[in-house]
Image: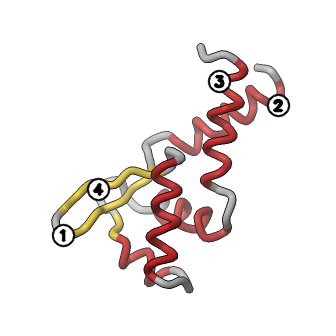
Amino acid sequence: MMSMDECKRRLAQLSKGLAHPARVEIVRILENKPRDQRCICCDIVKALPLAQSSVSQHLKVLKETGWIQGEIDRPRVCYCTVEGIPEYYLALLKRTLHGE
């Protein structure tokens, strides 16, 4: 089991990933896709009122913070959420707030 300090660090890292409404929406879009139907950047751009460059930057942050993963399917990168990440985030939040 991870220490409380590590739990807080990981919670803060994941929270950074959700610190913008566009990133929350990207996670929602990807989480509601069947696991075998990964999403490419242009699909996400179509779903959001943002430029492709902005979506790419948000995807980069989500990947760096552990919310999503990308698989190269030349010439594209196909994205999906890391399996179980919403449940993991909630468990970290609960443990941090309640010491469980």
Q: Are marks 4 and 3 in contact (CB under 8 Å)?
A: no
* Residue for badge 2: 97
> In this view of the protein, which residue sits in the foreground, 19 or 53?
53
Q: Which residue is mark 1?
A: 75
Residue type (three-letter) at the residue carrying disc 4: Asp
The label on residue 6 is 3
Q: Amino acid at mark 3?
A: Glu
| Gap between marks 2 and 1 measured at Cα | 43 Å
Q: Residue at x 67, y 47 (%)?
A: 15
Q: What count of labels does the image hold?
A: 4
Q: Which residue type carries mark 1? A: Pro
Question: In percent of the image, x 67 and y 37: which residue is there?
Answer: 11
Q: Are marks 4 and 1 in contact (CB under 8 Å)?
A: no
Q: CA distance from mark 4 to mark 2?
A: 34 Å
Reading the image, the residue beneath label 4 is 36
Please, what secondary structure does the residue beneath circle 4 have? loop
Who is closer to the viewer here, 88 or 50?
A: 50
